[in-house]
Image: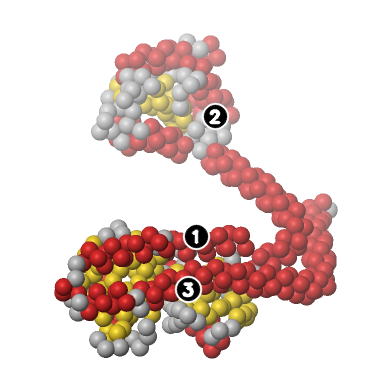
């Protein structure tokens, strides 16, 4: 009856556990449905309001940082000294304009200041004449692109060749004279890390992402340099683009975030602020998963116990598969594994393999019976075990046994001779007139487990054909 009830009890326990889990899960579901709507709405509103206020602060800071260099660049472009110098460039000293650029850079604390003459195409900077711009130079493409644009001022993010190729935001402004026409382009540069630090401060304080894009939706300034040149998602950019001059915000369901945009009219750029609201989900999950964590821990604990028991059982089964049940020694498979492992180690110390069987054991077994024969086997194994307690010994099959000795051949022969004599003179075995024949082989570097056993078997055969009750070495 117990065997019949056990599965029923096991099934009952499983069903009970399932019902308990179902009740607990239903309770959590009810709590979730009662609170989730108001909880999410309140938190969403708070996060949106904080993000909107933060974006206004960022917009003001960024607008201030970018508007000032724009005004300075416009001032330079309209400076009568600059225009006069460019008109009369051939007769003027280049050092005059270089001194002017350096003085202006120091006055406003910008990282760079420059001027390019449209007539000579010479590139002047605060520290000298840098080069002559050319359509063949990839770094000069911005200059020729701006000439084609129907706009007076433009922003460009590029590596400053003058200043160790440091990534810099350049505010470029055309110099146009009513009579002479286009005279050149001038402007100042701000290292990108200046704007990055400004954005980074807000990002760290308010856990959001802020960056600048141009009128095509391409990222121009980001705290992560790798993001430069990326294009804003089309769906996000289209929602921001029509609202120039306004603060625009919306919920981006795909990314689980709020997106807030500000158009910087003077620069034709956008400030983008993105606030991840997935933390709402984390907060809610934390409340619900806390209770589940207990059950998870218990489940994991039970699973670990089961795994340990299974592994222990498997280990025991593997061990049993390598043991001879009569003698308790390793069986042939177990010995093969250990011999192969030893040979694979390429041991430097000598070792030998011996193989022995009981002389005329079949006749003894037939005369006295298998039970008595088994006792004789066990007695002989015990004598070997007393002498070689720390060595690997195995039953090779029937009345054949094999073992490992960490000795060279001569030492092994001496040790095995003492065992052979002990068996020959054992008082419990004398009446049965049993003895053992032993074959010994010493390992060499070219040996494999197969070759060693073949040599040991050959040596054993020599011992048996040589009169038995003796030791022969291969």
Residue 149 drawn above or below residue 460 = below
Residue at position x 79%, y 54% in the image: 6
User: What secondary structure is marked by label 2?
Assistant: loop
Label 2: how many Cα within 10 Å (few below 14, some 14–19, many 20+): some
User: What secondary structure is marked by label 1?
Assistant: helix
Q: Could you tell which of marks 2 and 1 lies nearer the N-terminus?
A: 1
User: What secondary structure is marked by label 3?
Assistant: helix
Residue position marked by numbered label 2 in the rendering: 327
Residue position marked by numbered label 1 in the rendering: 197
Q: How many marks?
A: 3
1 vs 3, front mark = 3
Q: Could you tell which of marks 3 and 2 lies nearer the N-terminus?
A: 3
Q: Are marks 2 and 1 in contact (CB under 8 Å)?
A: no
Q: Could you tell which of marks 1 and 3 lies nearer the N-terminus?
A: 3
The reply to whether residue 54 is visible in this rendering is yes
Query: In the displayed structure, does residue 356 sit left or right of residue 57?
Result: left
Label 3: how many Cα within 10 Å (few below 14, some 14–19, many 20+): some
Look at the image and tell me in which quarter the C terminus lies: top left
Q: Nearer the viewer, residue 167 or 338?
A: 167
Whole-angstrom CA distance, mark 2 to mark 1, is 79 Å
Residue at position x 52%, y 62% in the image: 198
Residue 376, x across and y down, in percent: 53, 23
Query: In the displayed structure, does residue 30 sit left or right of residue 252?
Result: right
Q: Which mark is residue 67?
A: 3
């Amino acid at each position: 009856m117990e065997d019949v009830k056990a599965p029923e009890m096991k099934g009952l326990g499983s069903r009970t556990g399932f019902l308990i889990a179902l009740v607990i899960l239903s309770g959590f579901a009810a709590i979730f449905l009662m609170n989730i709507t108001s909880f999410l709405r309140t938190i969403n509103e708070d996060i949106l309001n904080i993000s909107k206020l933060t974006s206004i602060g960022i917009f003001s800071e960024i607008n201030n940082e970018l508007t000032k260099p724009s005004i300075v660049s416009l001032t330079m472009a309209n400076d009568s000294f600059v225009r006069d110098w460019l008109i009369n460039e051939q007769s003027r000293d280049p050092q005059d304009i270089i001194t002017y650029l350096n003085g202006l850079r120091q006055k406003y604390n910008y990282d760079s200041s420059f001027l390019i003459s449209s007539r000579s195409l010479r590139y002047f900077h605060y520290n000298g004449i840098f080069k002559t711009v050319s359509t063949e130079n990839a770094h000069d493409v911005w200059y020729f692109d701006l000439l084609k644009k129907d706009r007076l001022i433009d922003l460009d993010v590029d590596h400053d060749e003058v200043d160790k190729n440091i990534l810099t935001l350049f505010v470029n402004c055309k110099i146009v004279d009513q009579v002479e026409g286009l005279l050149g382009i001038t402007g100042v540069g701000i290292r990108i890390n200046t704007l990055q630090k400004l954005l980074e401060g807000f990002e760290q304080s308010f856990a959001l992402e802020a960056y600048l894009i141009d009128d095509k939706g391409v990222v121009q300034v980001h705290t992560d340099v790798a993001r430069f040149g990326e294009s804003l998602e089309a769906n996000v950019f289209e929602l921001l683009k029509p609202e120039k001059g306004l603060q625009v915000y919306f919920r981006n369901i795909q990314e689980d975030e709020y997106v807030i945009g500000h158009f910087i009219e003077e620069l034709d750029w956008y400030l983008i602020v993105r606030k991840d609201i997935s933390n709402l989900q984390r907060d809610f999950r934390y409340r619900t998963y806390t209770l589940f964590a207990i059950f998870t821990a218990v489940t994991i604990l039970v699973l670990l116990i089961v795994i340990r028991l299974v592994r222990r059982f498997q280990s025991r089964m593997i061990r049993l598969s390598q043991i001879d049940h009569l003698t308790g020694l390793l069986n042939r498979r177990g010995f093969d594994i250990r011999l192969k492992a030893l040979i694979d180690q390429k041991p430097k110390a000598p070792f030998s393999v011996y193989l022995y069987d009981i002389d005329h054991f079949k006749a003894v077994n037939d005369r006295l019976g298998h039970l008595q024969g088994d006792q004789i086997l066990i007695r002989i194994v015990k004598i070997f075990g007393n002498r070689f307690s720390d060595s690997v010994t195995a039953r090779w099959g029937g009345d054949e046994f094999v073992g490992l000795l960490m000795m060279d051949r001569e030492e092994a022969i001496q040790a095995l001779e003492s065992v052979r004599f002990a068996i020959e003179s054992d008082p419990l075995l004398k009446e049965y007139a049993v003895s053992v024949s032993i074959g010994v082989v010493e390992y060499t570097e070219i040996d494999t487990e197969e070759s060693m056993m073949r040599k040991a078997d050959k040596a054993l055969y020599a011992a048996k054909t040589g009169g038995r009750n003796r030791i022969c070495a291969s």
